[in-house]
Amino acid sequence: MKKIILLSLIFFTLIADSCKKTLDVNSSRVVNETNYWNTLEDARAGIMGVYGLTRAALADNNGHWIYGDVRMGNFDSPIRQDLKAVIANNLNASYPVINQLSNWRRFYAIVNAANIFLERIGEVKAKDPRYTPNNMNVDVAQVRFLRAFAYFYMVRIWGDVPLILSSRDGTFENRPRTDQNAVLVYVQSEMETAALVLPYLYSNQDLQQPGLYYNQSRTRWSGALVTKLGAYSMLAHVAAWQGKYVDVIRYTKIVLTDYNTKGGLSYTGTGTLTSPGGLFYTNTNNLNDNHLFGFGFVWDYQDASFTGNIESLTLAAPVVNKNVPDIYVPKDSILSIFKEPNDARFQIDTTGTTYTDSQNGTSRGYFANYLGKYPIFAKIKVIMGGDIDPSFRLFSSTILLTRLEDVTLLRAEAYAVLGETALAIIDLNTIRQLRYNIDQVGIQNASANDYLAYDATRNGPVIEAIFKERQKEFMGEGHHFYDRVRYEKIKQNNPQFMQLINSGGIYWPISRDLLAQNPLLTQNSYWK
């Protein structure tokens, strides 16, 4: 194990050095890797390196949440001027965080690591008989998927990005941007190819991955690696972003047909969703199959961090010893979003009483300290090993890209767009039943009539109800801005936002550092 860790650190160093040269400086060579691609341990270190770089890219500067939740979203910031600028879509503002988040270098570190892995992994197969053809095929599928995921993530942020599929043997050159539609065609094709090879579960006698994967048990890999159903779930997002809703139904059907018999998945109750030791806690002693695709910060592996988790932005007293949160959801927004009775995620009456249980001063619903100046968004609160201790601000929650509830509402969205309203309502009510069940809410003397299935008179058009449910269900998970773009493209009744879409204002500006270093790059027109 120590050798693997050491090799991973060497690999990270090589990749960081080579990525710095990609796209932004003149051609040069990376450190020699002659002694690296020889053994099974090298293969494992290489693939774990690609996973590690992907997690780092999402967590850096809390980017995943600033891109997806803070920008033009539900959150406000009490004191941070850089976050106020992001909220207002003022992305040309001169703040270090905005400039760093405008730089795609950390995502091209993923791409470069993946390219090197795919070019060199055959050497391990030739030199180490322990590295079986099946092991290599599954590894290659994962790396191809992660490379495609990096490109999908970048396209949603910057639009057109350079498409680089070769490390050129360690020699790099500046590249212009590639049309995002061509990149997305590549992404969809690569993810589909990978999905065909990936197993449903690892170390679980899957036909596509028999035996122990790298000699580790199923619990070690549960929620840690991309699976077949995780790949199809992300494919649904890729298709939805392109408006290919027939493909969305095709991909989501695979997940929703096989999830309970082949994937070990289940829908998540509200208590588990909001518990410190629940969905967002990666527990090495239990299965994390409900993390369809995500990146854990595992306390047991010393992965906890003071930043790079949403808790570092959202939590403050009384949950942790921090006076003011970096971001919070204003009370009027909370009341406008969670306005239906018996919503277990948040409910409050006219006296200011919240009908959710409390634990260690925090609500089991989404919010704590509601009557204070700044309501604390405490849906995700994995502190240390899943316990609540206000003395510490060491967090270990999972960056969760997709889960079963997400896939279900994506299919509902697709059905609604394609005119299959009855089917859309069935999927919508599947999620509503999880969150509006009076047994979960725990309200005394609640009437069965208080449970609200979708009703057009009460909830409006079905497509609006679906996106409203997504707004509530995935608050704090990095979906909101992308959901809003899809919603506005579907409705096309918001001239101001449509102008933002048509002018490229939904994308981030490209970092001035990249533009200065690579003359072939052009700035997004909206930000010139």
Image: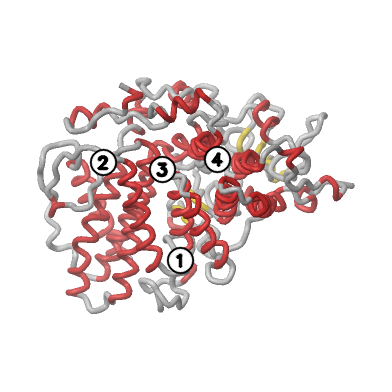
Q: Earlier in the sequence, mark 1 or mark 4?
A: 1
Callout 2: few (<14), some (14-19), or many (20+) C-alpha neighbours within 10 Å? Answer: some
Q: Quadrant of the N terminus?
A: bottom left
Distance of mark 3 from mark 4, alpha carbons? Answer: 14 Å
Q: Callout 3: helix, strand or loop?
A: helix
Q: Callout 1: helix, strand or loop?
A: helix
Q: Is residue 421 above or below residue 131?
A: above
Q: Earlier in the sequence, mark 4 or mark 2?
A: 2
Instruction: Quadrant for residue 45, please give it.
Output: bottom left
Q: Which residue is mark 3?
A: 59
Q: Is residue 327 above or below residue 399?
A: above
Q: Amino acid at mark 4?
A: Gly
Q: Nearer the viewer, mark 4 or mark 2?
A: 2
Q: Residue at x 59, y 67 (%)?
A: 260
Name of the residue lying farthest toward the right:
445
Q: Callout 2: helix, strand or loop?
A: loop
Q: Nearer the viewer, mark 3 or mark 4?
A: 4
Q: Which residue is mark 4?
A: 476
